[in-house]
Image: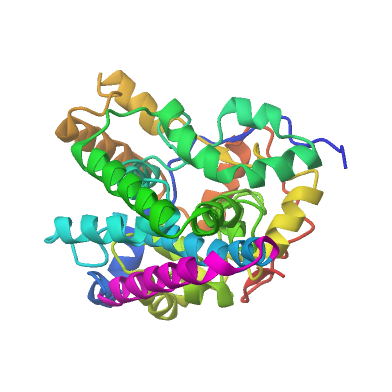
């Protein structure tokens, strides 16, 4: 159980993130993809139904023995609260009501946040957008594990604790890596949530608050759905940094498993991502993917090649922003100007190369890279490389 991580460092690359280039190529080849962009009212319906179920369950567990309270907390509340936390992802991209109704999206975020007992919907949006802009960036991607996490959670026991601590790490990590001042909307989120928690405690009692609060703590920790935290960007196959999951859990998680598809087109609602995959099979069917989040967690813990360091890091965008005195991200127009220049340079250097040639260059430039494929994932020609 004490075996330590075999990887000595993060995998450093000297190319930009792949999704911007893929997006341009796909839109040129499949312009009909634009019809999928927009918003989807079904997100709001799913959120409201889930919240109502959680409120009903919070009332019902009041009179149950503690053993059953904890059982329902893990199985039911853990699943539904994790689903609601993933709804922040859709809401944060304004996919419920569209970019033209930002307030409606924020209100829906407040509603989705209620059963989780921890104010987080607005803060998630604030930092998640940077994950898309700066995927894998050493300084600016709030999703990357810190160097301290990479050092601390190297053993198998450490990786178990790492998974269990995901709710804490996801909350604290952005504040340490790319801290931003608190906004008025976050204060409103905080007030609403604390009032709701107080009302639940006063009218329903301890068992109800335990059901809701620990549903969040356990559901976002050692829970099968938490496999998506690991499956999305941890390196299971050298040369690939984003992975999709195609399995039944997508039905209750707004298709968050379609992660390559989402990073290619963040403005397409989760409900429409399977259609995107069907439109452009040549861009997705040959990519390695997962079919079990539980299997992802097991292999993450047991495979010495996998751990917090199994992430790609780069510094192209932060280096460019530093050179232009825009690393504080305060001047949005300057930031966008610099990022466009980085993207254009990346496209000019690689647009004429085939996917295989770009991958070969990527592999040669990666520090300490290896062509070895994780034992838990397979590559095939013309078919999905599935992690089963």
Q: Where residue 1 sits in the image (x, y, percent)?
A: 88, 42
Above or below, 40 against 309 in this view is: below
- Coloring basis for residues: rainbow
- On screen, residue 222 versus residue 61, left or right, reads right
Q: Nearer the viewer, residue 79 or 387?
A: 79
Counting the numbered discs, the total is 0
Residue drawn at 65 percent across, 46 percent down: 164
Magenta stretch bounds: 41-67
Coordinates of residue 71 in the picture (x, y in percent): 66, 65
The outermost residue toward the left is 100
**Residue nearest the observer in this picture, 85 or 116:** 116
Q: Could you say where residue 171 lies in the image, as x and y percent from the top left?
A: 46, 39
Residue 99 visible in rendering: no
Residue ID at (76%, 49%): 301
Residue depicted at x 26% and y 67%: 96
The quadrant in which the C terminus is found is bottom right
Left or right: where 274 falls relative to 360:
left
Membership of 121 in magenta stretch: no
Most common secondary structure along the magenta stretch: helix
Q: Residue at x 66, y 72 (%)?
A: 381
Q: Quadrant of residue 211?
A: bottom right
Query: Height in image: 176 above or below 192?
Result: above
Please state which of residues 198 and 148 is positioned toward the viewer in this rendering. 198
List x then y, in percent, for residue 68. 66, 67
Horizontal arrangement in the rendering, residue 22 relative to residue 223 (left or right): left
| Residue 66 is one of the magenta-drawn residues | yes
Write down the quadrant of residue 38 in the picture: bottom left
């Amino acid at each position: 159980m004490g075996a330590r991580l075999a990887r000595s460092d993060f995998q450093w690359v000297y190319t930009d993130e792949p999704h911007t280039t893929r997006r341009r190529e796909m839109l040129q080849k499949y312009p009909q993809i634009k019809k999928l962009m927009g918003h989807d009212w079904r997100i709001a319906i799913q959120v409201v139904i889930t919240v109502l179920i959680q409120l009903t369950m919070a009332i019902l567990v009041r009179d149950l023995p503690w053993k059953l309270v904890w059982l329902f907390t893990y199985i039911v509340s853990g699943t539904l609260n994790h689903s609601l936390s993933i709804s922040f992802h859709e809401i944060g991209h304004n996919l419920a009501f569209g970019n033209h109704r930002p307030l409606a999206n924020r209100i829906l975020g407040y509603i989705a946040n209620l059963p989780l007992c921890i104010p987080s919907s607005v803060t998630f949006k604030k930092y998640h957008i940077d994950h898309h802009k700066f995927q894998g960036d050493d300084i600016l991607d709030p999703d990357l594990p810190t160097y301290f996490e990479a050092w601390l959670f190297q053993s198998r026991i450490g990786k178990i604790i790492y998974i269990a601590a995901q709710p804490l790490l996801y909350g604290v990590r952005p504040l340490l890596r790319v801290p931003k001042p608190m906004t008025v909307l976050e204060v409103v989120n905080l007030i609403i949530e604390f009032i709701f928690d107080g009302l639940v405690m006063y009218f329903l009692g301890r068992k109800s608050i335990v059901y809701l609060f620990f549903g969040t703590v356990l559901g976002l920790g050692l829970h099968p759905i938490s496999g998506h935290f690991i499956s999305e960007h941890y390196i299971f196959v050298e040369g690939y940094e984003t992975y999709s999951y195609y399995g039944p859990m997508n039905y209750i998680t707004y298709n968050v498993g379609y992660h390559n598809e989402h990073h290619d087109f963040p403005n397409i609602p989760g409900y429409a991502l399977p259609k995107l995959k069907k439109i452009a099979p040549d861009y997705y069917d040959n990519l390695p993917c997962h079919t079990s989040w539980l299997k992802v967690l097991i292999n993450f813990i047991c495979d010495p090649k996998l751990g917090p360091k199994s992430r790609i890091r780069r510094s192209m965008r932060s280096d460019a922003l530093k050179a232009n005195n825009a690393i504080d991200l305060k001047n949005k127009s300057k930031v966008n100007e610099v990022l466009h220049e980085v993207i254009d340079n990346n496209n000019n250097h690689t647009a004429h190369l085939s996917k295989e040639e770009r991958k070969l260059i990527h592999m040669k430039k990666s520090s300490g890279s290896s062509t070895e494929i994780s034992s838990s994932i397979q590559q095939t020609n013309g078919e999905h490389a599935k992690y089963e």
